[in-house]
Amino acid sequence: MINVIGLGYIGLPTALMFASHGVEVVGTDYNKELVDTLNHGHTTFEEDGLDELFAEAVKCGIKFSAEYAKTDMYIVAVATPYDKKSKKIDAGYVVAAVKNVMEVCPKGATVVIESTVSPGTIDRFVRPVIEEKGFVIGEDINIVHAPERIIPGNMVYELRHNSRTIGADDPEIGEKVKNCYASFCQGEIVVTDIRTAEMTKVVENTFRDINIAFANELLKICRSDNMDVYEIIRIANKHPRVNILSPGPGVGGHCISVDPWFLVGDYPSLANLIKQARTINDSMPEFVLNRIHEIMKEKGIKDVKKVGLYGLTYKENVDDTRESPTLQMLECMERHLAFGVRVYDPYVKKDITENQYHDFDEFLNDVDMVVILVGHDEIRNNMDKLKGKIVLDTRNICNPDGVYRL
């Protein structure tokens, strides 16, 4: 049996995938309301294919509980935020989960940390917790790091098809854990040591962050000298060894916008390029606000209530708002005492900010200017509804004629 700890965006799909492939699974979360929702037959977030996977897992006998189970394998999939001052990882949730595991686990159990952590986190935080409880690592308890590698919007497919990394002290334990994941994972599963596994996951997201930062810095350069960044990128990408990404209003989600800071926090004198990339990408929401201000001034819009922000999630066609550029923009507006902007997102059902609409037409009727911050299919398929509106397209999804761009 596997006890999956943390039933959020990573833990829940992972638990469901194991269960639907014949593994006995108990999913545990400290949030009793979340556990109750799952036990009543409902998933807790929207994701393509998740409801079908949930139904299959329930049919196979998955259980959900607020209590930790006594078993021989635990998968910890809890959040790993960072301290915004030091930029270092906050391993508090991981440490708390491991401490709770130590209260119930039998001798010989394996604890798999699936949460993304900075290199050395398991050495600095996890091993001491286990040793303080009197366990001998490698005899009483085995530690493994198997970082997730999936993205909201395509989780179910990527769980099955993406390659995985298993980091373990003992290669034999690593192979055992590999065989567990192979119950559903069709991608290559690499077994290595723990620090390499930790670093590999952080490096993957840092690489993507740096590439996005290049596109965003290029956007700023082109905007300063009246050049079309999108045309420049289109032509440059015709080179067989060039693949510049698209600029945008910022970087969100719990991976790309967070993981690079782990390296900045741990290696402040060495992670210079990484820090600059993070700074560039974090500056984009304010860059968008300045662009909105320019357009309002040009068009004679004096009331911010006539401006509507389309999109609250961090990417298209998901309901995940973690580290969303739109929310970053709203925080910035609050600091500048600019209140009243209208907001709408078809995937965000609950009110998470002021002046949030839940009907697209009502939202459009109340604004003169629409700022497209997320390229949901809804707006891509309803461009005709934007006729007569002043449009700032930060995602380059509109016909450029008559539309403002970053």
Image: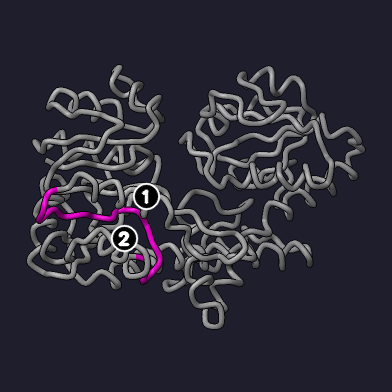
Q: Is residue 168 left or right of residue 311?
A: left
Q: Position of residue 358 (x, y in %)?
A: 61, 20
Identified at 51% across, 58% down, the residue is 82
Q: Secondary structure at mark 1?
A: helix
Q: Residue at x 58, y 66 (%)?
A: 86
- Main SS of residues in magenta: loop
- Residue range corresponding to the magenta coloring: 106-121
Percent position of residue 156, x then y: 28, 40
Q: Residues within 10 Å of mark 2 (few under 14, many from 20)?
A: some
Left or right: 187 in relation to 321: left
Q: Is residue 112 magenta?
A: yes
Position of residue 168 relative to residue 255, above or below, is below
Judge from the rendering whether residue 80 lies leftward or rightward of residue 269; answer left or right: left
Q: Locate residue 205, reporting x and y percent.
A: 43, 62
Q: Position of residue 355 (x, y in %)?
A: 72, 26
Of marks 2 and 1, which one's residue comes earlier in the chain?
1
Residue 96's disc is 1
Amino acid type of the residue tagged 1 in the rendering = Ala
Nearer to me, 175 or 361:
175
From this view, report whether residue 108 is shown above or below residue 368. below
Identify the residue position indicated by label 2 in the image: 129
